[in-house]
Every structure is written in C-alpha cells, then in structure tokens.
C-alpha cells in the first residue's frame, strides 16, 4: 500500500485510468468479434476506428493494431478490398514520340 500522499494520489489516478482503459479494450474486443462474425464493411470500419483510437490513447501497441486491422481486412470479400485499397491513377495524356 502507498505510504506518502503523492503515492496515494497516484494510486487513485491509476485505478481511474485502469477502469477507463478496461472499458475501451472491452468495446474494442466486442467490435472485433462482431466484425469477424458479420464480415460487413461497416462493422470492420467501426472496429478499425476503435483500434486506431486505442493506439492514440496508448491502450494497445501500434503493432497489435496493425495485426488487428490486417486480420479484419482479410475477412472482407475480395471485391471490396480491391476497391478500398487500390485507386487507379489516370494515365498522362502527354506522350513523347521520337522521330
């Protein structure tokens, strides 16, 4: 148990942060489960968003977030993955010809 006044204050703060982080992790886990079961892009987008927010708040590591997002994107059908990840750039209209 903490002895000093500042250690007691730090313990209170730590307990509050722990409970907030636990709630965020639980919401993230539920969102990941529902996204993997439903395989709907809306659910995957929500889980991805929660993952990014958890990384921003240092609740999970960015490498773990990358693994989560990668596995979620693999659950989507191939058609929607191609549309989302690949954007076709228009070809240049100028062509140079040598004479």
Image (spheres, helix red, strand yellow):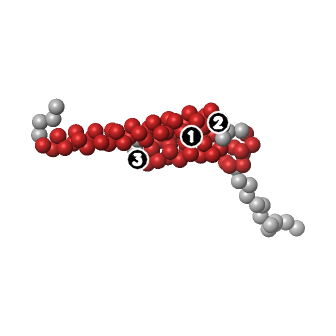
Residue that numbered label 3 is attached to:
57
On the rendered image, what quadrant is the N terminus found in?
Answer: top left
Mark 3 to mark 1: distance in Å? 17 Å
For the residue carrying disc 1, how many other residues have a C-alpha within 10 Å: few (<14), some (14-19), or many (20+)?
some
Q: Residue at x 68, y 49 (%)?
A: 84
Observer-nearest of 38 and 89: 38
Secondary element type, mark 1? helix
On the rendered image, what quadrant is the C terminus found in?
Answer: bottom right
Residue that numbered label 2 is attached to:
38
Q: Is residue 14 left or right of residue 86?
A: left
Mark 2 to mark 1: distance in Å? 15 Å
State the image quarter where residue 33 is shown: top right
> Which mark sits nearer the N-terminus, 3 or 1?
3
Q: Is residue 17 left or right of residue 43?
A: left
Q: Is residue 57 above or below residue 1?
A: below
Q: Residues at badges 3 and 1 in contact (C-beta under 8 Å)?
A: no
For the residue carrying disc 3, how many other residues have a C-alpha within 10 Å: few (<14), some (14-19), or many (20+)?
few
Q: Residue placed farthest to the left in the image?
A: 4
Observer-nearest of 21 and 84: 21
The mark found on residue 56 in the picture is none
For the residue carrying disc 2, how many other residues have a C-alpha within 10 Å: few (<14), some (14-19), or many (20+)?
few
Q: Is residue 18 left or right of residue 56?
A: left
Residue that numbered label 1 is attached to:
69
2 or 1: mark nearer the eye: 2
> Which mark sits nearer the N-terminus, 3 or 2?
2
Q: Residues at badges 3 and 2 in contact (C-beta under 8 Å)?
A: no
Q: Can you give x and y, in whole percent of width and height, for residue 14 in the image?
A: 27, 40
Q: Residue placed farthest to the right in the image?
A: 99
Q: Residues at badges 2 and 1 in contact (C-beta under 8 Å)?
A: no
Q: Can you give x and y, in whole percent of width and height, for residue 98 in the image?
A: 85, 66
Q: Can you give x and y, in whole percent of width and height, for residue 28 in the image?
A: 49, 39
């Amino acid at each position: 148990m903490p002895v000093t006044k500042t250690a007691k204050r730090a313990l209170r703060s730590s307990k509050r942060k722990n409970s907030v982080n636990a709630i965020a992790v639980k919401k993230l886990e539920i969102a990941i489960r529902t996204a993997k079961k439903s395989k709907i892009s809306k659910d995957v987008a929500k889980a991805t968003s929660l993952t990014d927010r958890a990384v921003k708040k240092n609740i999970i590591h960015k490498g773990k977030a990358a693994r989560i997002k990668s596995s979620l994107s693999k659950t989507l059908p191939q058609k929607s993955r191609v549309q989302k990840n690949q954007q076709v750039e228009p070809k240049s209209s100028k062509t140079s010809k040598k004479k």
